[in-house]
Amino acid sequence: MRDTLTTTPHAASMTLSQWYLACSVCNRREPADAGVGLCPDCQAPYLAHLDGPVPDRGKIGSRWDMWRYGPALPVDSPDDVLTLGEGCTPLIESSSLAEWVGVRRLWIKDEGVNPTASFKSRGLAMSVMRAKARGVSGLVVPTAGNAGAALAAYGAAAGVPVRVYAPDTTPAPILGTVRAMGVELVTVPGHIGDAGRLAMAFAAASGYFNVATLREPFRVEGNKTLGLELVEQLGWRFPDAVVYPTGGGEGVIGIWKAFCEMKEWGWVSADAQLPSLAVAQATGCAPLVRAWIDGLDRATPWENPVTHAAGLRVPSPLGDRLVLRALRESRGSAAAIDEESISAATLLLASGTGIDAAPEGGCALAAARELVRAKRISAAGEVVVFNTGSGASYRT
Ligand SMILES: *Cc1c(COP(=O)(O)O)cnc(C)c1O
């Protein structure tokens, strides 16, 4: 399969046979198409790795969706991908928000304009494509909301049956999107952890494949395009800092993997300094911020998680070790923001830019300001804040 590396004008891609999976703790290896969950020895996530020629930045496609980065992704054929037009989202500079945050330059990366109104489109487009190629009978996911909407849409696009488990407190417009795709929706009293237990039991009983955050390695590969795209939009330059509203951790892990790979592959100049990562969480559910402040490499479960930023209501993030490792490697930082300040910053983000900000984006903006004031992010730098979802998903 090695010689099937194509040079079509669309995108040249590494074939799946050049990829393998490795446990993020013990490095236990599995073939890329093994369809595994967590490592049986460590109960830790697998990540996908390329074991082939270094991808060529010049082979990026001319297509206008995340599959333009086919050369960096586990894709069989660039012309045979599952797409609803995910990725290629706006990067918008705001001088008024830069002033409010207290930095030289500030950019908002607006993920709310993705097909299912959040960055979850990227990861699930990739994982549904990979799962379909293995011939799964169905797909199941526990979700705080947006991952369910994305799985429903990509399941519909791929013609694969889907079941979604979501808390009954999930914003109504998001549940409405899941229902509109005609998939099975089970609402659950409690939080995403409770939904996760039910999804696992259902997967075991039905044979459906569970694509929960980091239980499935290809969502991270889709999320890598967050970082690849950002750096291309900046003219193949790294920003100084990236602030990401973090729940399970898959977004921030994907971005960090992309930054490290770009550096390793020579996609940015050899002396480019890797950005520092900042994790934003809500004070009502901040297991990663707590672990970071306590200097730990694992998070302990958050009791009684409460926040209106639904995507951040993840009390036991499976990606804890990887997120905390990325924070250490990037000389990063973390901040927790209270509910009132999240609301105020969400309004400021929207009214200052015209972007339909989600509360998660507001949380990241407020965290950027707090971390600049605490001198954890340099005021002289260039900062990118991710608005990970759409405000429309939260209006009832
Ligand atoms: C899922 C989600 C998050 C958190 O992302 P993780 O990858 O789980 O850390 C943040 N914002 C929104 C809008 C989300 O849907």
Image: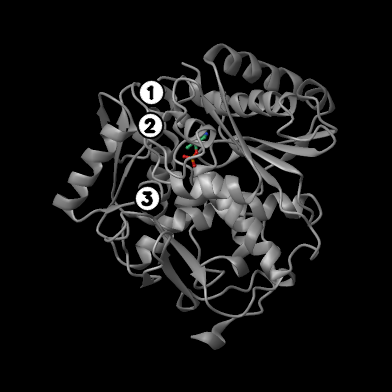
Q: In the image, 125: left or right of 35?
A: right
At 31% from the left and 54% from the top, the residue drawn is 43
At 36% from the left and 61% from the top, the residue drawn is 131
Q: Which residue is mark 2?
A: 315
User: Under tag 2, what secondary structure?
Assistant: loop
The CA span between labels 2 and 1 is 6 Å
Q: Position of residue 302 (x, y in %)?
A: 37, 28
Residue lying furthest left: 205
Front position in the image: 26 or 351: 26
Which amino acid, mark 2? Answer: Pro
Q: Position of residue 329 (x, y in %)?
A: 61, 51
Q: Residues within 10 Å of mark 2 (few under 14, many from 20)?
A: many
Q: Which mark is residue 305?
A: 1
At 68% from the left and 41% from the top, the residue drawn is 242
3 and 2 marks in contact (CB < 8 Å): no
Residue lying furthest top: 340
Q: Nearer the viewer, mark 3 or mark 2?
A: 2
Would the CB of label 2 be found within 8 Å of ligand 1?
no
Q: Which mark is residue 155?
A: 3
Residue lying furthest front: 295
Which amino acid, mark 3? Answer: Gly
Front position in the image: 384 or 241: 241
Query: Dividing the picture into quarters, in which one does residue 178 lie?
Result: top left
Say whether disc 2 or disc 1 marks the residue closer to the N-terminus. 1
